[in-house]
Image (cartoon, grey):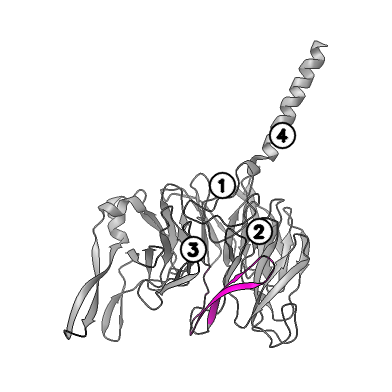
Amino acid sequence: MKNIKTLVILLLAVFGTIFTTQMSHAATPFNQGDGYEKGAYDLNAIQPTSENWSKHSRFNGPTKPEIKWQFSTKNWITTGLVIGKDGTIYSGFLDGIYAISSKGKVKWQYSLGQGVEARSTPVIGKDGTIYIGASTQFASKDNKVCKLNQCLGGLLAFNPNGKLKWKVTFSEIVNGTPILDKDGNIYIGTGNYYTLDGGLYAVNSKGKIIWSHKNKMYGFQTAPAITKSGYLFAQNNYFKHREFIKDYMGELMTEFSSPVVGPDETLYFGSYTGGFVAMNPDGTAKWEIRLDRTDNKSDGTTYTYGARVSTTAALTRNQQIYTGDENGRLYSIRLTDLTNAPINEKMRQTYDEEADVLDWVLDYHYYHMDDLVSLNNKQNWVRETGSWVNTIVVGQNGTVFVGTEDGLLYSYDPYGKQNWKMNLKDRIGDITIGESGMLYVSVGKKVVAIGNKK
């Protein structure tokens, strides 16, 4: 009898360990970051969104990488990757939307029609619904989004089994990734950054447009973000509970990357002119870091412009931030060091009509990246990757993963030491960290799964 009791206790311990292991990621749900409004995402999903979060994962990537499997199609991947709670990977390709198992096999595929492109990374709602945007700009006939010439884009909602729940169409193209607010409403932008009119739309979980804001001459190409106090930021437009505050478009601190939100609701993003910018959520400027001192002349006036910063930054829980530019430089910035860095003043000329007087006022403060490196080169550093930095994500332990336009995948420690590098030989569009030390990477026409060597 004593031996039987001992056996039962051992079995309970074993099964208890297995159960705890299986429940580990449910016990550590997805967390956007302390500064965000908590969107109605599937918090048990491994990675329910690619934007509107800090990009500091609760999982770690591989330390000794090897390719475990590759999933290929004949068409390019056009979106990033998200991962459901069962390990299913969702992504958009030129020929439609795919659900791929954790073993690299197709679970389902939904064709949008000839010339219709999935253009926004999917997001996963709390009930498992998958939302994704598509553009019909190049459609040549009726398609799954709308009849020919009846729309330029749409937002589609799918059940996890691939069945279409609903769709809503727009008169503008869709490029931006959707996000979710606390009530499950989906925010998605239309148009593009340069010339096409666009709008920002809120669509409820039943597929009805409940709010919109339109712009002329430029649209919403980056993803929005919502702060915990209800501020909404989208492509240089600032709102509070959907009430318009201001438009910052056309100024030096113009947004060119999707934002990340700090614990105090500061918005951080890259600019068209080579800066890394911090803005208050009401649209007032905090500061800019000029990432290099390259001088370009335009119309006889000298400006301090650097390479564009189009990748979404990653912000860690200890206030370390990583960003990259289109010249292939990766930057690490310790935000607390700004208090000790040399500060500069950007002045703006104003005109008093009554007094007929020109005057100068402070526009914002700015810093130089090389000054930060001189101050603390352990946590403020610059690394050359060789090509346009497309995507950055940070593991739970602080490891920084970086993907570039020419197919190089890097792993760095928090102090800039390169852990490893892989050449995946095609454009890297997105990196997602999964469970058990896995990385999932969109590479050209493939999804590549990378894990630890056995």
Q: Tell me if residue 5 is in the magenta stretch.
A: no
Q: Picture coordinates of residue 352 (x, y %)?
A: 21, 82
Q: Picture coordinates of residue 246 (x, y %)?
A: 41, 73
Distance between the alpha carbons at the discs numbered 4 and 2? 28 Å
Identity of the amino acid at label 2? Gly
Distance between the alpha carbons at the discs numbered 4 and 3? 37 Å
Q: Which residue is mark 3?
A: 312
| Helix, strand or loop under label 3 | loop
Distance between the alpha carbons at the discs numbered 3 and 2? 22 Å
- In the image, 134 versus 447, the foreground residue is 134
- Label 1 vs 4, first from the N-terminus: 4
Q: State the residue lying farthest toward the top.
A: 2
- Label 1 vs 2, first from the N-terminus: 1
Residue found at x 78% / y 66%: 163
Identity of the amino acid at label 4? Ile
Tell me whether circle 4 and circle 3 mark residues in contact (CB < 8 Å). Answer: no
Q: Picture coordinates of residue 177 (x, y %)?
A: 58, 68
Q: Which residue is mark 1?
A: 58
Count of numbered badges drawn on the protein: 4
Q: Which residue is mark 4?
A: 18
Identity of the amino acid at label 3? Thr
Q: Residues within 10 Å of mark 2 (few under 14, many from 20)?
A: many
Q: Which residue is mark 2?
A: 125
Distance between the alpha carbons at the discs numbered 1 and 3? 18 Å
Q: Tell me if residue 221 is in the magenta stretch.
A: yes
Quadrant of residue 8 within the rendered picture: top right
